[in-house]
Image: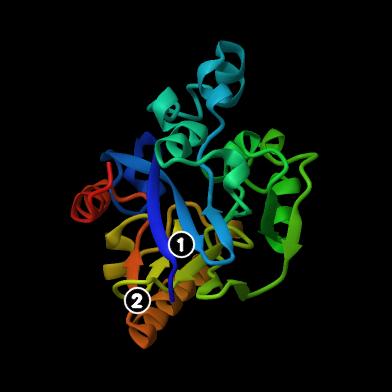
Amino acid sequence: MSNRLRALLTGRHRYDKTLSTRGRGAGVVIEAPILAYLIETPNGRILYDVGCDYQKLHDPAQRARYFAPDAFTYGAPTMTEDERLPAQLKALGLQPADIDLVFIGHLHFDHAGGLCELPGCEVHVQADELAAATAQEDSAYFAADFAGRALRTQQGEYEVAPGVRAIASPGHTAGHMSLLVELAAGPPVLLCGDAADLQENLEYEIAPGLCWREREDLALASIRKLKSLAHETGAQLWPNHDLAFWAGTMAARGWH
């Protein structure tokens, strides 16, 4: 398998830890990385998630509309110009047109907002996820991120590309998907997405703070499923918003 994987740090977000660990950590403020993942395969380039919409963070009117202080107690996420997807791709000798497919794990604003940076790109999303997002089932869906965008809806697990498999992991949201990636060198990587924000979610089997329709049981079943799949395949589990984990991973892999 000749697939290659790279994480792209597209911003950071400070929030109360209970958003990541259900019922634990009240009053503890964590700083979470907001990531996209570039997967290069012989069949093309895939992005798993795309981060936030830069304009919603930096245009004063949009920032006031989308990130009101009563909802975002510790402020909106931060994103520099260099952290925008076009700038990150340019640093790798690529441009948005070089991305063949975007796989959205779920449609929350910090995972789908950057779709505006990738016009014309094929976008995969689960039908259940799109239905929940369209119905605005929680406040982390920003309809402007995806409304009017041509989306290719999927149902259930499938092979996205050779050695890249979509794994159903609902609970945080209705149609949340993780991604199992086989690599040219080293063990496979299982990108958890927000099924597991932190290593703590995996180690102690703690559901994320926000669960679709309060289905903590569904979120815990997905965590256990991902752990079992990692055991079966020898894959490394990568939590999605764990700053210490990402600092170590990026340093070990020589990513900047």
Which residue is drawn at the image coordinates 44% and 67% (left, top)? 3
Sequence order check, earlier mark of 2 and 1: 1
**In the displayed structure, would residue 28 be above or below residue 3?**
above
**In the displayed structure, would residue 13 be above or below residue 121?**
above
Q: Which residue is mark 2?
A: 235
Asked whether 229 or 3 is in front, the reply is: 3
Q: Which residue is mark 1?
A: 195
**Residue 33 appears in which quarter of the rendering?**
top left
What amino acid is found at the position of numbered circle 1 in the picture? Answer: Ala
Name of the residue lying farthest toward the bottom:
232
Q: Residue 244: x, y in percent?
A: 22, 49
| Residues tagged 2 and 1 counted as in contact (Cβ below 8 A) | no
**In the displayed structure, would residue 142 be above or below residue 209?**
above
Number of numbered callouts drawn: 2
- On screen, residue 48 versus residue 191, left or right, reads right
> Gap in Å between the C-alphas at discs 2 and 1?
16 Å
What amino acid is found at the position of numbered circle 2 in the picture? Answer: Ala
- Residue 49 in view in this figure: yes
| Disc 2 element | loop
Which residue is drawn at the image coordinates 45% and 70% (left, top)? 181
Q: Residue 131: x, y in percent?
A: 75, 55
- On screen, residue 93 versus residue 124, left or right, reads left
Q: Residue 130: x, y in percent?
A: 72, 54
- Graded by Cα atoms within 10 Å as few (under 14), some (14 to 19) or many (20 or more), the crowding at tag 2 reads many
Q: Give the quadrant of the N terminus.
A: bottom left
- On screen, residue 231 versus residue 103, left or right, reads left
Which residue is drawn at the image coordinates 38% and 50% (left, top)? 7
- Residue 204 in view in this figure: no
Which of label 2 and label 1 is nearer to you?
2
Q: Residue 47: x, y in percent?
A: 53, 52
